[in-house]
Image (spheres, rainbow, N blue to C red):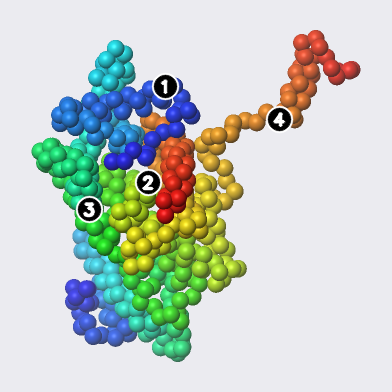
Amino acid sequence: MFGYVKPFIPELKVCEDEIYKAIYCGLCKQLGRSYNQLSRLILSYDIVFLVLFALGISNENVKFQRENCIAHPFKKNLCLKSCMALEKAADISVIFSYFKFMDNVADERFLKKFISHIGLITFKRMYEKARRKHADIAGVVEELMDRQAEVEKNPSCSLDRACDPMARCLGLIVQTFSDDSKTQKILYRIGYMVGRYIYIMDALDDLNRDYKTGTFNPFLNKYSQNGFTKSLKIDDNIKEKIFKNALCALNFSVAQLAQAFELLEFNDYKSIVKNIIYLGLKSVEKKVFDKYSQRLEILEDSV
Amino acid sequence: MREYYELLGISEEATDKQVKDAYIAMKNKYDPGSYEKEDLKQHAIEKTEQITKAFDEIMNARRVDRMKKGESVKDSFDAENTDNLEDRVVDFDYIEELIGSDDLDTAEEILDSLERKNRLPRWYYLKGLIFFKKGWLGEATEFFEAACRMDPQNLIYRQAWERAMWQRTGHFGNPGSESPYGNGSRPLVGCGVCDICGGLLCADCCCNCLGGSFLRGC
């Protein structure tokens, strides 16, 4: 996926940091085991967050062990050994990446389109393997793509409506981590809010590109006529409005995510997840905003 | 829906009063108290439950229909008793109940079908509540705000809106509450001038500050 959901490392305890990295390593190796070495490239922080959740909710017994890795050939790092949560997360990664490639083939141009084409071909086999194991999740993501396309056709679509497909999709996926209907409800809310967060961040990150190419972006959409973003001029006023709007939406989503998370009975790794929710998401948010305030200035000069 | 009518032995065109009469007659007929034998009694209890469910379902469906048309939501046998046909208030309590039981689609359908004149502050609040439950936080805030503007005295609307505004500005939980994690950029425990003085006083009282007493007579 996109890599927006990660912890704020300076506030993690040393042991927590090590566990987080061990899960990251574990997922990478699991991808290699379940699929092939190439698939290890699609590793992302967002999926690590899902693993943390799956581990925290189930009482699965997991083992850590020191192992070597291609990225660190001379140092043995702690690594989570293969377990149910990792296997499922690896499958989810593959499903998401496959659809991401598909999306890129439709949206992007030139080199990126070419790369995505290759990705699509190489991942087709893996995707089919993952789909056989998790038909429900593949179905949910497929539905997401259809609904997203539907939503983006509407030129006057609100931010909430634009977020909904992605948010719903993650909600339904996170929901599958538990069998208890009460927990499922909380998990759905958590997944929904994470999805909302990711979608909004992604839209912000792509603002510049979408502005240039005239593709759909929920933030630009609001200020352009008839959905043609190309005719839009971003002045200070609109810039500020976009920022304010995005920041409020992100803050509210994170606060709701936190509220739902506090209701959950969570076993291990609670402190790491809390770090991600209360500090990590905000720090990533800040990074994107900082980057943006510079980028928009450049944009303005060129107009 | 048809099977409920069949269970009560009436047609779908029956008036509210006929439905109620049929229900009471059936209930009397299967009164579990009038059965001695245990297995028969069990059967009667089941039957009574089915009848009650059928009656509730029918009446609720009719209420929803009426609300959509903007008519009085009072059941007509109630209306006959009170003779108050002018009473055309929308049953917002019922809609709130629907929202509470997560039947958001029905609740939204009813709200959207209401005419403009029936859109009281409560309408905006409930609409916001539906959006909030769906996770459409932006629209929810707008509707809470509208409800608040129309009825500034109402505490519930105000609370919902203020909580939304609090969380939108980067806080967690209820207005005024601290983040459960503490603020990452600020140390959790402060050490100001007062803390230093307090600490020194304490040390002085306990052990004369390792011999360097600075409070005379202590």
Mark 3 or mark 1, whichever is nearer to me: 3
List the residue tagged with mark 2.
Answer: A205
Q: Which mark is residue B192?
A: 4
| Secondary structure found at label 1 | helix
Type of the residue with mark 3: Met
Which class describes the residues within 10 Å of circle 4: few (<14), some (14-19), or many (20+)? few
Type of the residue with mark 4: Gly
Whether callout 3 and callout 1 share a subunit is answered yes
Whether callout 4 and callout 3 share a subunit is answered no
Type of the residue with mark 1: Cys
List the residue tagged with mark 1.
Answer: A15
Mark 1 or mark 2, whichever is nearer to me: 2
Q: Earlier in the sequence, mark 3 or mark 2?
A: 3
Q: Which mark is residue A145?
A: 3
Q: Quadrant of the N terminus of chain A?
A: top left
**How far apart in space, not on screen, are marks 4 and 2 (Cα)?**
41 Å
Type of the residue with mark 2: Asp
The x, y position of residue A178, in whole percent, is 28, 42
Mark 4 or mark 2, whichever is nearer to me: 2
Q: Earlier in the sequence, mark 3 or mark 1?
A: 1
Q: Which residue is depicted at the point 43% across and 77% down? A: B90
| Secondary structure found at label 4 | loop
Marks 1/2 in contact by CB < 8 Å: the verdict is no
